[in-house]
Amino acid sequence: QVPLQESGPGLVKASETLSLTCTVSGGSISTFYWSWIRQPPGKGLEWIGYIYYSGSTKYNPSLKSRATISIDTSKNQFSLKLSSVTAADTAVYYCARGIGSYYVLYYFDSWGQGTPVTVSS
Amino acid sequence: QSVLTQPPSVSAAPGQKVTISCSGSSSNIGNNYVSWYQQLPGTAPKLLIYDNNKRPSGIPDRFSGSKSGSSATLGITGLQTGDEADYYCGTWDSSLSAHFVFGTGTKVAVL
């Protein structure tokens, strides 16, 4: 396990773009599937997508191409951008380290503490 | 809406056993590894079980996982008040739009 820390604005206006960054400490960002997961208030977990250290990405089709995940290996960081946000995107956003093979995720062994994001109208 | 179905809640007295089911299909549980996560109130989820039945270092053997066909089960024996939490299963869905899916979540109450 490695420490992960999310950062970014806690308030985003509707129709704008949500931007979050996850900083990975104490370990290399290489070789793993770096993911974003969110949890709306009082609801369950939803996987948003991952980026492999090589730059390959995979997203949840439910987000309809609004999500973009990028990586900066020199800073040990990866980021999420979610465009055209609505109130339905209000949630706690977690970054997590994914373990998998051949672009198939098996599980998440390290999680950030989560950062709440509210979309305001 | 999740493709993995879990009971909304289960409960038992301290020291007893509970099981949580996770029902899916051949495109997810049937052909991929299942993992389980514990989410204590106000905290981030924590990995409990991976690769269907393996426990990470530090997870007590009171927690166990199994898989049969398109369903998986998490078992908790010797229930403790500290086990009160939400539990989620998760797996890869290999359908046309492949992606990771979580179960609907189960709240465990210790009576």
Image (cartoon, coloured by chain):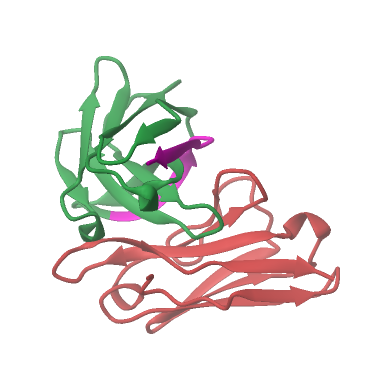
Chain colours: A green, B red
Name the quadrant of the C terminus of chain B: bottom right
Question: Which contiguous range is marked in magenta?
Answer: A105-121
Residue B8 in sight here: yes
Look at the picture and state if A74 lies above or below A11: above
Q: Quadrant of residue B15?
A: bottom right
Main secondary structure type of the part rendered in magenta? strand
Residue A10 is left or right of residue A30, and the answer is right
Residue at (24, 21) in percent of width and height: A73
Percent x, y for residue A117? 44, 37
Residue at (39, 23) in percent of width and height: A23
In the current view of this chain or complex, which residue is farthest to the top?
Answer: A74
Percent x, y for residue A8? 40, 25
Residue B34 in sight here: no
Percent x, y for residue B46? 56, 48
Residue A39 is left or right of residue A61, and the answer is right
Residue at (30, 38) in percent of width and height: A32
- Is residue A115 part of the magenta span, yes or no? yes
> Could you say which is closer to the camera, residue B110 or residue A108?
B110
Look at the picture and state if A78 lies above or below A96: above
Name the quadrant of the N terminus of chain B: bottom left
Look at the picture and state if A53 lies above or below B35: above
> Could you say which is closer to the camera, residue B4 or residue A90?
A90
Q: Count all numbered tags in the image, as a single digit.
A: 0
> Could you say which is closer to the camera, residue A13 or residue B9?
A13
In the current view of this chain or complex, which residue is farthest to the front?
Answer: A121
- Is residue B42 part of the magenta span, yes or no? no
> Could you say which is closer to the camera, residue B61 or residue A105?
A105
Residue B60 is left or right of residue B6, and the answer is right
Residue at (45, 39) in percent of width and height: A118
Q: Quadrant of residue B69?
A: bottom left
Look at the picture and state if A46 lies above or below B21: above
